[in-house]
């Protein structure tokens, strides 16, 4: 599956030929350098390792610097492997946003925004007092009853409760590519993608 590493720039909206306003996300996609070529003979599987976004040399380990030096490039901040790449690439090759075409569909994977410790109303959509659930009656946003009485005398695993929310790997599938701005390495896709501004995302065809 061909793809690129990118960075979420932010959201905007554009008008289509019918005058409809379409919400979209702008992604800085590539250029990415092929930093390693995995083969069946050596690694037991075939894949391309791509690197994106230059990293300061003083913040890199010597092992990492040696790895990137083989590809003839500087250290990279983000490294991702792509299996079953559509085209054959060599070590050190540059792959840019032109592998995508307007009108095709892509999958975008990223880490969702972390929201910290949240209660059950925000985290699981409980109704609160207006739509009282789980035995609560006079507390606005409390979870209510969470366990049975003498049997089984415990709270079941998987009970929806308050806890840490967000910061998870999320993949949004079948987003249509609205624009490819090759000279600025920008990809405009319909809809929203996970993550905050300037967070890394993986775009797959």
Image: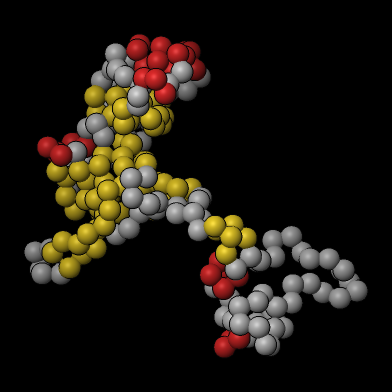
User: Among all residues in the image, which is located at the extreme right?
Assistant: 150
Q: Which of 198/145 is in front? A: 198
Q: How many marks?
A: 0
Relative to residue 190, is residue 104 depicted above or below? above
Relative to residue 91, is residue 155 depicted above or below? below
Relative placement, left or right, of 161 versus 176 is right
Could you tell me which quadrant the C terminus lies in?
top left
> Where is residue 121 shown, x and y percent of the image?
57, 73
Q: Residue at x 91, y 74 (%)?
A: 150
Relative placement, left or right, of 30 versus 196 is left
Q: Residue at x 62, y 60 (%)?
A: 163
> Where is residue 174 shown, x and y percent of the image?
33, 53
Question: Can you tell which quarter of the image residue 89 is in?
Answer: top left
Q: Which of 70/75 is in front? A: 75
Residue 39 appears in view: no
Relative to residue 13, is residue 149 depicted above or below? below
Q: Residue at x 14, y 43 (%)?
A: 181
Q: How is the image coloured?
A: secondary structure
Q: Residue at x 39, y 32 (%)?
A: 78
Residue 100 appears in view: yes
> Where is residue 127 shown, x and y percent of the image?
57, 80
Could you tell me which quadrant the N terminus lies in?
top left
Q: Which of 16/11 is in front? A: 11
> Where is residue 154 shown, x and y percent of the image?
83, 66
């Amino acid at each position: 599956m061909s793809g690129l590493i990118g960075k979420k720039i932010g959201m905007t909206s554009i008008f289509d030929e019918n005058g409809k306003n379409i919400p979209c996300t702008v992604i800085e996609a590539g250029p990415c350098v092929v930093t390693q070529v995995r083969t069946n003979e050596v690694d037991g599987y075939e894949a391309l390792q791509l690197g994106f976004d230059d990293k300061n040399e003083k913040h890199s380990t010597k092992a990492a610097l040696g790895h990137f030096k083989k590809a003839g490039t500087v250290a990279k901040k983000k490294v991702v492997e792509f299996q079953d790449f559509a085209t054959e690439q060599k070590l050190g090759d540059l792959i840019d946003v032109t592998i995508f075409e307007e009108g095709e569909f892509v999958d975008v994977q990223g880490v969702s925004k972390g929201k910290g410790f949240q209660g059950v109303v925000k985290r699981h959509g409980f109704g609160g007092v207006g739509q009282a659930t789980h035995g609560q009656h006079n507390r606005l946003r409390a979870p209510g009853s969470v366990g049975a009485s003498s049997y089984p005398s415990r709270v079941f695993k998987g009970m929806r409760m308050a806890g840490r929310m967000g910061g998870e790997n999320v993949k949004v599938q079948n987003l249509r590519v609205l624009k490819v701005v090759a000279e600025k390495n920008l990809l405009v896709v319909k809809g929203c993608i996970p993550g905050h501004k300037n967070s890394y995302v993986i775009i797959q065809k």
